[in-house]
Amino acid sequence: MSTTGDLPARGRRRDRAATRAALLAAARRRFAAHGMDGVSVRDVAAEAGVDPALIFRYFGSKQALFTEAATVERDPVDVPAADLPLQLLRGVLDGAGRSGADHPLLALLRSSGHEQARLQLQRQMCEGFLDGFAELADGPDARLRAEMLGALLLGISVTRSVVRTPELAAADPARVEEVFAAMARAALGGPPA
Amino acid sequence: MSTTGDLPARGRRRDRAATRAALLAAARRRFAAHGMDGVSVRDVAAEAGVDPALIFRYFGSKQALFTEAATVERDPVDVPAADLPLQLLRGVLDGAGRSGADHPLLALLRSSGHEQARLQLQRQMCEGFLDGFAELADGPDARLRAEMLGALLLGISVTRSVVRTPELAAADPARVEEVFAAMARAALGGPPA
DNA sequence: CAGATAAGTCACCATTTGATGACTTGGCAC
DNA sequence: GTGCCAAGTCATCAAATGGTGACTTATCTG
């Protein structure tokens, strides 16, 4: 709870960059947990240990803070395209390590009542991996199949981190991967003709 | 916008049951679209064409209204267990007909920042179909496989109605069903050993 | 140390929120 | 018609919200 968050204890007080970062980290956590409407600027500021007014100084508005907090910084993972699905699943599964809660996509999903958030979610999913999946299938249904696989991945993520279904939430990653692999193959597999 | 909603035009004004029903219908729509925190009691009342104070008269609190609005009335569909997955998929797909938007599960998902809503969602998914799915698979992984299938279904629903991915949102149900059937088979299929 | 500049604080505003309770009014029994 | 009771209205409350701007204070430069 102190790695990237909060204010770095006592090295240089009054550090613009550090304060901004603390605010952003707090926002990511809170927004992911409760959505845009479930969190007030005072909440975020309190979690960051900072004065609420600074949010407006550094970000302009609550909306702007949210938008930035919900943007997933994309390190261009260049794994072979064929490994992408499993790689992403591992990202979802790697437990409380990180990706589980406080994932930006969760914040977006929980705030999807706002059109702006919904669009951001849509874009991030398409550019994030759906476009990549589409190259793994072929035939006229390639794109549809890609999106079905994406739906599976999204469903697993949501089931684990928000619904928290008993088995899936706690299962050994290896077992999940096994079933997932079979389903992914079925999703991408060519037409049965 | 008048089938089940709003106030029945002029037959009997001052009808307790009708007013309550109008409020509930309006609440279902608004909560499903924007989540519990994105909707005020005044919003709901306005959509129902009714005074906001009546919400408290008839439901006691906003929370109680939400809880009732987000409860899916379960007509005990007794299709053969094996047909359940496809049946549910059809429910999700049957387009703007109904289940798409304003589905109670959507309201719960969008409000899942509240622990109470999250638990309600969890319960409704388990009792709603996960328990049923578990009987379709066997082996020690049966329950996990059931939940994976549930995740797929949930993912498809979310992808269609909130993310609104280009293909899946508009695809011909028959094509979706085909891919889904293959994935479902893979999910439930016994251990590869 | 003096002063300037950026970082942080604070009091405050207008609006919206959930909720309450006293009031008015429609419609039925007699 | 006359009352009565339930259904509906209204003014209002306290708290919380996003947002602003004037103020204070730390820190670095000279």
Image (tube, coloured by chain):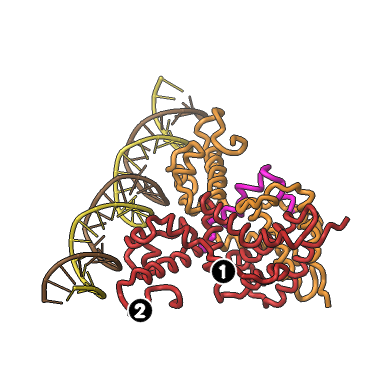
Chain colours: A red, B orange, C brown, D yellow
Question: Which residue sits at x=45%, y=48%?
Answer: B40
Amino acid type at circle 1 is Asp
Lateral position of residue B105 relative to residue A9, left or right: right
Residue A100: percent from the left, percent from the top? Answer: 57, 70
Q: Which residues are magenta?
A: B88-115
Label placed on residue A75: 1
Amino acid residing under circle 2? Ala
- Which quadrant: the C terminus of chain B? bottom right
Left or right: where does residue B114 sit relative to residue A163?
left
Q: Which residue is mark 2?
A: A9
For marks 1 and 2, the one nearer the N-term is 2
| Alpha-carbon span between mark 1 and mark 2 | 28 Å
Secondary structure under tag 1 reads: loop
Q: Residues within 10 Å of mark 1 (few under 14, many from 20)?
A: few
On whether residue B103 falls in the magenta region, the answer is yes
- Residue A78: x and y in percent read 64, 70
Locate residue B24: give its quadrant.
top right
Q: Position of residue A125 (x, y in %)?
A: 61, 59
Mostly what secondary structure, the magenta segment? helix
